[in-house]
């Protein structure tokens, strides 16, 4: 229930184990990290055994931020990686499963 | 309840049978696939017998990602295709029908 | 409950009678139609007797898609038109009034 | 519950009295008005005695539309103005307070 | 329950104490402040002891506004800062915890 962020650096996949958490992850933004290369950086997502999917493509000095709207929950092992020379900062928020946009009733 | 992705390659429509699933599909992003052509790629959607609709247009080296906000549920046969030389990666998430943003009550 | 799309061609307004339907219309995307003109196309919306409002402006080879987030429900007569040489494809989804993001209780 | 639009012309603030209405205002889009100036137009929002905030900046022939996601409710006097030579069309929708995304229960 | 805005000026972090408020903060937009520098301004967010995350990157005369979708709630001390020469205006809205998109039942 609050901010989530991850800097995905080139050259290694970043695992996210969605089953270990009681919260749904919403990823809502990608922003190019600081650097001088003008080549594009692409964020790739792999879920389990499925084919990897490209989530966004950031172009230095042209489009350095990109809104996203993704949810991860009970997906098993998810991994994020970057194709390109610069890191990408992912941000978003975590919510307790299925309870973010409704009044909770812990007290009732 | 979690990530959904599809790489739509040029030259063939990709069917999605929305009636066969118990989940509503949200498509929230389109990103240009890897390639060298600088011609644009457009994503087209056909639902049943209705006229096809263009969903987004991606321009290499200018705009390579596009946020979407589409829902498919009980639409019958949906098909996605690409007009242009490069594939487009669609991403989003699946939710159990009508139950995504509210606490489920399976246990109550 | 599912996909909605409309190609708005230049030169004629497209009416949408929001009172005749039991569903709320969400328009979430506009994409430039196929064509060769490089002049911009602007989508205009008129509701009842109110002043027309420009919804988005699409620039060929620069910005050919635009996310929207509009809802139409009990608005009476709505009409969409395009100022410019190329058509614009609107897309989105329909939901049963007020029931999209919560579990319905038809069975309870 | 339905479309909302406002053309904000340069040179005068446009007041919106959020306390007089029973509905929450969502502003979801800004689009540059028709004109020939190539200078940018910026939308500014002032709420009560607080410092004005810039909401978006539109650049003719480059970025003429901008998605927004703002809510106004019980804010007292809100005013919108434009810095720059061309008007900006704001659009969005009104909902009955707190009841937009849930099934109403007037009949229960 | 209503508009929230903050101008983040270069050179100093802006703290936001998310635990002191009964409301969830949604930040939905960033817009470049007025100025003449053509260098980019990047918004950075630090939450507690975690690594800082870049939220968006604004490019004068190219991309001066950026949609965001972030939520802050029970995050402890959050701080926003700008890397670059020009200020960035953040905007969004506050909601009472967990009660924004559902009808409240204070009267029931």
Image (cartoon, coloured by chain):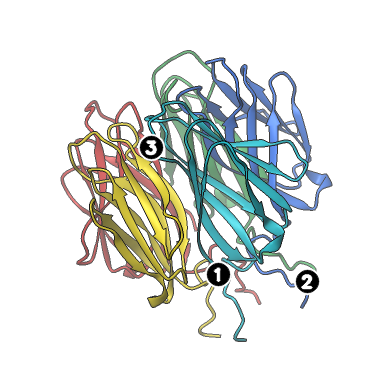
Chain colours: A cyan, B blue, C green, D red, E yellow
Query: Relative to residue C81, is residue A47 drawn left or right?
Result: right
Q: What element carries label 2?
A: loop
Query: Relative to residue C20, is residue C10 drawn left or right?
Result: left
* Label 2 vs label 3, nearer the camera: 2
Q: Position of residue C34 (x, y in %)?
A: 54, 19
User: CA–CA distance between discs 1 and 2?
Assistant: 20 Å
Picture residue at 68% right of the left edge, 48% below the top: A78
User: CA–CA distance between discs 2 and 3?
Assistant: 43 Å
The C terminus of chain D is located in which quarter? bottom right
- Can residue C28 be spotted in the picture? yes
- Can residue D6 be spotted in the picture? no
In which quadrant of the rendered view does residue C55 lie? top left
Picture residue at 36% right of the left edge, 32% below the top: D63
Residue under circle 1? Answer: E102
Residue found at the very far right of the displayed protein = B20
The answer to whether tags 1 and 2 share a subunit is no
- Tag 3 subunit: D
Q: Where is residue D51 in the image (x, y as percent from the top left)?
A: 21, 60
- Tag 1 subunit: E
The answer to whether tags 2 and 3 share a subunit is no
Label 1 with label 2: CB-CB less than 8 Å? no
Residue under circle 2? Answer: B106
């Amino acid at each position: 229930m609050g901010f989530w962020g991850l800097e995905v650096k080139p050259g290694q996949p970043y695992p996210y184990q969605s089953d270990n958490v009681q919260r749904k992850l919403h990823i809502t933004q990608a922003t190019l990290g600081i650097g001088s290369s003008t080549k594009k950086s692409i964020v790739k997502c792999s879920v389990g055994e499925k084919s990897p999917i490209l989530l966004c493509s950031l172009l230095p000095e042209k489009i350095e931020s990109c809104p996203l709207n993704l949810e991860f929950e009970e997906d098993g092992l998810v991994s994020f990686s970057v194709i390109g020379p610069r890191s990408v900062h992912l941000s978003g928020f975590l919510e307790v499963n299925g309870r973010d946009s409704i009044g909770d009733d812990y007290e009732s």
